Image (cartoon, grey):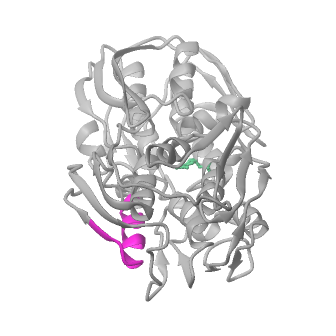
């Protein structure tokens, strides 16, 4: 896809549904009793992988949406013990969220399954869920013994644990909590910093009491007098702040722009990018703040701004981990230095995002250096169009498309169809 420099972007957009929430709605709807109807479900390839996995386990899921229209998804849930053994491998495609969260559920089913996905998924670390799930009694092995998919999971009876997670990861936390629904006694996860809390909010919404304190989330699985039980609900999925991020950045860095983004999720465990933009001097106004199914949302108005560098570290990182590539692009257009640290997790995302961001920004003439756990960007010098290889990583492709809108010359994004993972319709909305 070829991108040319633009000025004066004027747009009004509805942002597609949140990817994390869409995955969870399919999983909890499948495990609930009765019907769950999901509005504004994200029709991205990752969420479609989750649908297919649960359909393969005998759940009736009707998807009335298609690539560029959200539509509704209806699930006939069969309860916690209603999944059946799939006849072949569960294919998670490119989706780490499907792999890790579903593994927590599979750890307790009365059958053996193989979970596998694409080339990228086969390189992503699964030891982080294998360790705690094994402590709960699960039998889960990496078939090639390299800590990655393909995984073979044989369901077992589980016991609750209190897991001290070495990393702030919602995928790890959620895998443990979902396994905890089937475990005897209490299950708790304590993280170094709070990660996105959509699983906790949605479990509560479906009727499972989850308590949270500081960075610990806890639930009771099976006790002598009760067991967890989910009830089908109507779920409205707010727009994904991670997808909104590209249009927020475009509005800020392209001169004379004004963009209205409708219905963007602003959950405080996800809104790190908005806090960073404030620190950088960017203009983002909120309108129509509301809460739907426990998830806060608002409309955002973005106006072109002069940005300045900032430092991003510590507990802010999990609240913006997926937005670091686009924040790096904004930092390249900002005056002064931006330091991003404590973000070594970037190396194990869909691509090594320290490498893919730094090499591609260098190709656009940005003064940037990679560090062990992040990057340092000296912003403010003009960017030049270049050929960008996003290494099939959707967030890198979208970030550099935005970079190209304010660079001189042509920016050419290779393999641009990878945006379909999280934002089908992105190119039509942007160009
Ligand atoms: C996600 C959690 C994050 C995030 C990913 C989605 C989720 O991953 O990067 O895109 O839906 O739980 P980690 O839990 O690995 O940090």
Q: Is residue 209 above or below residue 350?
A: above
Q: Position of residue 200 (x, y in %)?
A: 55, 44
Return the residue nearer the eye: 60 or 333: 60
**55 in the magenta segment:** yes
Q: Name, please, the residue furthest toward the bottom.
A: 87
**Picture layout, residue 252 above or below residue 360:** above
Horizontal side, residue 243 vs residue 348: left or right: left
220 or 392, nearer to the observer: 220
Residue that sits furthest to the front in the current view: 225
Query: What's the residue at 67%, 64% (across, down)?
Result: 183
Q: Quadrant of the C terminus?
A: top left
- Residue 305 at x, y = what percent? 43, 12
Q: In screen coordinates, is 119 left or right of 243?
A: right
Instruction: Decide if residue 48 is in sight here.
Output: yes
Whether residue 120 is visible to the viewer of this picture, yes or no, is: no
Q: Is residue 109 left or right of residue 422?
A: right
Is residue 67 rendered magenta in the image?
no
Question: x, y (%) of residue 286?
Answer: 37, 16
What are the residue bounds of the magenta stretch?
47-61
| Prevailing secondary structure class for the magenta stretch in the rendered image | helix
For the point 30% across and 13% down, the residue is 256
Name the residue at 75% across, 72% down: 137
Looking at the picture, tell me which residue is in the foreground, 403 or 262: 262
Residue 63 sits above or below residue 145 on the image: above
Please report the residue visible at 56 percent of the width from the left and 40 percent of the height from the top: 197
Residue 370: horizontal and vertical position, in percent? 71, 40
């Amino acid at each position: 896809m070829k991108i040319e420099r633009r000025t004066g972007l004027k747009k009004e957009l509805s942002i597609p549904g949140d990817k994390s929430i869409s995955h969870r709605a399919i999983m909890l709807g499948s495990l609930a009793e009765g019907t769950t109807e999901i509005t504004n479900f994200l029709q991205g390839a990752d969420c479609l992988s989750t649908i297919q996995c649960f359909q393969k386990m005998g759940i009736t899921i009707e998807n009335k949406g298609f690539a560029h229209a959200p539509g509704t998804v209806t699930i006939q849930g069969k309860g916690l013990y209603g999944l059946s053994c799939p006849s072949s491998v569960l294919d998670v495609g490119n989706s780490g969220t499907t792999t890790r969260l579903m593994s927590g559920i599979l750890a307790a089913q009365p059958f053996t399954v193989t979970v596998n996905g694409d080339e990228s998924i086969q390189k992503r670390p699964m030891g982080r869920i294998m360790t705690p799930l094994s402590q709960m009694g699960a039998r889960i092995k990496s078939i090639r013994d390299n800590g990655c998919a393909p995984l073979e999971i044989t369901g077992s009876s589980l016991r609750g644990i209190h897991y001290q997670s070495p990393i702030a990861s919602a995928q790890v936390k959620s895998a443990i909590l979902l396994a905890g629904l089937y475990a005897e006694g209490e299950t708790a996860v304590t993280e170094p910093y709070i990660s996105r809390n959509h699983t906790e909010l949605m479990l509560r919404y479906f009727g499972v009491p989850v308590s949270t304190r500081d960075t610990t989330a806890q639930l009771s699985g099976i006790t002598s007098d009760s067991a967890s039980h989910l009830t089908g609900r109507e779920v409205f999925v707010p727009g994904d702040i991670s997808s909104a991020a590209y249009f927020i950045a475009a509005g800020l860095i392209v001169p004379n722009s004004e963009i209205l983004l409708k219905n963007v999720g602003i959950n405080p465990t996800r809104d790190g990018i908005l806090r960073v933009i404030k620190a950088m001097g960017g203009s983002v106004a909120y309108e129509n703040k509301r809460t739907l199914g426990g998830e806060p949302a608002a409309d955002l108005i973005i106006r072109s701004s002069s940005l300045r560098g900032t430092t991003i570290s510590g507990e802010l990182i999990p609240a913006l981990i997926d937005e670091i590539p686009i924040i790096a692009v904004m930092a390249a257009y900002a005056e002064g230095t931006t330091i991003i640290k404590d973000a070594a997790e970037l190396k194990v995302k869909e691509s090594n995002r320290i490498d893919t961001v730094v090499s591609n920004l260098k190709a656009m003439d940005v003064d940037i250096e990679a560090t062990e756990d992040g990057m340092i960007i000296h912003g403010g010098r003009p960017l030049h169009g270049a050929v960008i290889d996003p290494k099939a990583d959707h967030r890198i492709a979208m970030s550099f498309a935005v970079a190209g809108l304010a660079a001189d010359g042509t920016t050419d994004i290779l393999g641009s169809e990878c945006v379909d993972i999280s934002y089908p319709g992105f190119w039509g909305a942007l160009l």
